Amino acid sequence: MAEQWETHPVTPERFDDFADIVNPNRRENHCWCLSHRLAAPQIRELGGGSRQNAMRALCERDHPPGVVTYLDGTPVGWCSISPRTEIPRLEASKLIRRVDDVPVWSIICVVVRSGFRRRGVTHQLLEGAVAYAASHGAPAVEAHPVDPPGRMDLTMAFVGTRGMFEKAGFEVIGTTDAVASRMPRLVMRRDLR
């Protein structure tokens, strides 16, 4: 029987699926994928001091903060994607500046659930994320992965690699002034026009 893949925006009804991927133990001080979206005062304002509640609030917006990919009904991957203008720290970054005026959607995080790595999740996840952006009129999707000279340090896996994005149809259009684990970060784009 063929594997069944689906990708959906992280709406409030799918919040627990997102959490099962990025923070299965629901630890408050663990990552909730907020660092590029909200400053500490905004987290307190949105979530009453709880990072989990702040992320729940973001899931209620017109553009939820990303998508979850499912394999045979099990949530297996998370991709943080939305219009760049809705990612304030990225938009204001002096290290990862805009390359032009195209109103891109940006991918800032990719996570594959433990136990599901090396099964093609990333490809399905990126295709689903791009399709989600396209369905909302995005003219292009950008990402800022690293270009490792060899095997990548898995602690930085959320950043993604050049090869991962090239397999999903992205092309290098520049570099950033940012680095991750001493590796330069690229600007990669997939044009949807």
Image (cartoon, rainbow, N blue to C red):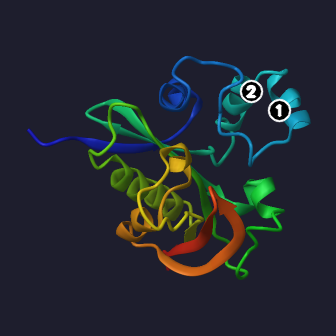
Q: Earlier in the sequence, mark 2 or mark 1?
A: 1
Residue sitting at 64 percent across and 70 percent down? 104
Query: Which of the two residues, 114 or 62, is positioned nearer the viewer here?
Result: 114
Visible residue check, residue 139: no
Can residue 191 be seen here?
Answer: yes
In the rendered image, which quarter is residue 86 located in? bottom right
Mark 2 lies on residue: 51
Query: Horizontal placement of 89 versus 25: left or right?
Result: right
Q: Residue 114 location, x and y as percent? A: 40, 32
Q: Specify few, some or many for label 2: CA neighbours under 10 Å numbering under 14, 14-19, or 20 or more.
A: many
View extreme (left): residue: 1
* Category of crowding for the residue at label 1, using alpha-carbon neighbours closer than 10 angstroms: few (below 14), some (14–19), many (at least 20): many
Please identify the residue farthest to the right as the structure is shown: 41
Residue plotted at (54% across, 74% down):
189
What secondary structure is found at the residue carrying circle 1? helix
Residue 121 lies, with reference to residue 189, above or below; the image says above
**Picture coordinates of residue 182, whole percent (x, y):** 64, 61
- From mark 2 to mark 1, how far is it between C-alphas? 6 Å
Amino acid type assigned to the residue bearing label 2 in the image: Arg
Position of 159 with respect to 162 (left or right) is right
Q: Is residue 100 above or below residue 112?
A: below
- Residue pictured at 84% horizontal, 21% vertical: 49
Contact (Cβ within 8 Å) of mark 2 with mark 1 = yes
Q: Quadrant of residue 93?
A: bottom right
Q: Is 168 positioned to the left or the right of 14 in the image?
A: left
Q: Which mark is residue 43?
A: 1
Q: Secondary structure at mark 2?
A: helix
**Residue 148 in picture, x, y percent from top left:** 49, 65
Task: Work out whether 82 lies above or below 37.
Answer: below
Residue 161 - label: none
